[in-house]
Image (cartoon, rainbow, N blue to C red):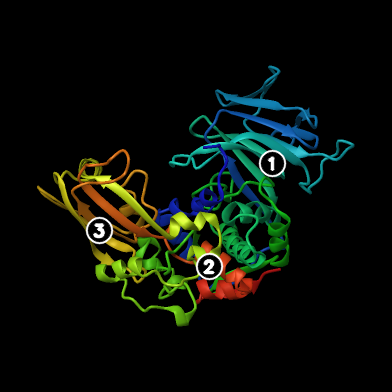
């Protein structure tokens, strides 16, 4: 596989790694019912990298290098690749020059070498890691607009932080999350959702670190700078400028995932530490035209099996969305041998050879809230959604699945072995916007406002500036 995120993988970035600390809930609840106050197009600090001791960059605009006290240390000319290495808390340039500073600021300068507060400068960075710690972990060359700050972190790696205006930041989020060639209304919906999450980050500390407001990877929103921008995605950001989703006077952390499988989910069944986020209460719904709703009870195993056997005409059905990356996400299958699942469950609790896997509780979308493994020496129960998926390695695409025992599996590397055949639907947590469905709704002529009203029925659209 080439080390560049495909459209399907791009969209999966926001699916799994949502921060699960209680700090999130406290920060969000702390601003409930407060009026949102924010400057027009405010600056935002984005953590680009934090897992390497070296960074190779090529300024496309002259960069003046300062320390934290704004003392000029160097000048990096445009077009010349430069490698900086961190050792013992200090930075060294590839020509041997050492900087007696515990942080560096690389500020864009005009042709005369004068710096300004307007971060118009473009800079290329080699092999920026993404998906760190996940099965899709890789790296790619990226291009950014803004000013850079470099800090040693507590793991003796470099925190690379980009400072840029919020709307410029969104140019790098929208195509990274939903694909730059998606229909313009879907891009607009994605822009508003991403802006809402970013404004929440600016007005709270839910994603913040010592030097940044938000990250560029899986624990907040994917951001790749100018690398994946298209005219269509840029237009979507521009035409929705300043618009966010709000609920009870606060910005909404507008969740989205690749494919809901035909039905979205209530937040209370996915993240127990975010159960008080009322914006998503009772918002689970059929992802399609009301007339096409088969009205199947997905809280039962029988209903889920019927859902698989007679797929509804939902927005996110591949035939409606007409995008290749939906085909393997809408409905999927995973085969796992008895020995394999027995070893995986034993990492949590040793209950001997696994005999049965069953749902003890499902949400309205069919997603398992609690899953029970029955072994020869006892039982093990786990939940909610992501914890269930993460029993498998790599994690399952969603927790909408059934598990049927079979004497002989058919996968090439498991053929003839006894195990379980998992039939599943969707990719992701299912809360908020289904990105596949948004693309389909846009193709049907829905506006970005109609798309957002469908997926965030309890929220209102608000123009901040």
* N-term mark: 3 or 1: 1
Q: Is residue 277 above or below residue 390?
A: below
Residue 68 visible here:
no
The residue that label 1 is drawn on is 143
* N-term mark: 2 or 1: 1
C-alpha separation, residue under disc 3 versus residue under disc 2: 32 Å
The residue that label 2 is drawn on is 320
- 364 left or right, relative to 150: left
Residue 315, disc: none
Which quarter shows the C terminus?
Answer: bottom right
Foreground mark, 3 or 2? 2
Q: Position of residue 123 (x, y in %)?
A: 72, 38
In the image, 37 versus 112, the foreground residue is 112
Category of crowding for the residue at label 2, using alpha-carbon neighbours closer than 10 angstroms: few (below 14), some (14–19), many (at least 20): some
Residue 371, disc: 3
Q: Label 1 near label 3: C-beta < 8 Å?
A: no
Q: Position of residue 108 (x, y in %)?
A: 78, 40
Q: Position of residue 120 (x, y in %)?
A: 78, 46
């Amino acid at each position: 596989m080439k080390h560049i995120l495909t459209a399907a993988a791009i969209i999966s970035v926001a699916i799994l790694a949502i921060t699960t600390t209680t700090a999130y809930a406290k920060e969000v609840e702390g601003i409930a019912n407060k009026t949102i106050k924010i400057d027009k197009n405010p600056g935002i600090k984005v953590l680009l990298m934090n897992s390497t001791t070296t960074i190779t960059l090529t300024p496309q605009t002259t960069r003046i290098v300062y320390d934290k006290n704004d003392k000029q240390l160097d000048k990096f000319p445009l077009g010349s690749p430069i490698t900086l290495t961190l050792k013992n808390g200090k930075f060294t340039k590839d020509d041997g020059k050492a900087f007696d500073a515990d942080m560096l600021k690389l500020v864009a300068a005009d042709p005369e070498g004068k710096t300004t507060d307007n971060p118009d400068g473009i800079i290329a960075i080699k092999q920026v890691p993404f998906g760190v710690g996940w099965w899709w972990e890789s790296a790619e060359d990226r291009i950014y607009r803004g000013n850079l700050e470099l800090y040693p972190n507590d793991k003796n790696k470099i925190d690379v932080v980009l400072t840029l205006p919020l709307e410029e930041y969104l140019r790098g989020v929208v195509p990274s999350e939903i694909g730059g060639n998606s229909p313009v209304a879907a891009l607009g919906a994605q822009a508003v959702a991403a802006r809402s999450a970013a404004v929440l980050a600016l007005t709270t500390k839910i994603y913040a670190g010592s030097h940044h407001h938000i990250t560029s990877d899986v624990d907040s929103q994917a951001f790749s700078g100018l690398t994946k921008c298209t005219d269509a995605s840029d237009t979507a950001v521009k035409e929705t400028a300043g618009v966010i989703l709000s609920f009870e006077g606060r910005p909404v952390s507008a969740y989205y995932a690749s494919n809901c499988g035909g039905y979205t989910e209530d937040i209370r069944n996915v993240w127990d530490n975010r159960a008080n986020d009322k914006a998503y209460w009772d918002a689970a719904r059929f992802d399609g035209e009301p007339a096409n709703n088969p009205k199947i009870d997905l809280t039962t195993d029988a209903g889920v099996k019927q859902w698989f056997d007679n797929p509804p005409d939902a927005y996110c059905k591949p035939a409606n969305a007409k995008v290749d990356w939906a085909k393997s996400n809408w409905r999927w299958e995973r085969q796992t041998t008895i020995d394999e699942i027995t070893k995986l469950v034993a990492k949590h609790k040793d209950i001997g050879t696994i005999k049965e896997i069953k749902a003890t509780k499902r949400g309205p979308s069919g997603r398992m809230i609690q899953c029970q493994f029955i072994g020869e020496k006892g039982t093990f129960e786990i939940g909610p959604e992501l914890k269930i998926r993460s029993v498998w390695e790599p994690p399952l695409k969603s927790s909408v699945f059934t598990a049927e025992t079979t004497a002989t599996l058919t996968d090439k590397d498991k053929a003839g072995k006894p195990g379980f055949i998992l039939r599943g639907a969707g990719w992701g947590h299912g809360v908020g916007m289904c990105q596949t469905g948004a693309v389909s709704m846009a193709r049907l002529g829905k506006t970005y406002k109609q798309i957002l009203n469908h997926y965030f029925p309890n929220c209102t659209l608000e123009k901040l500036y």
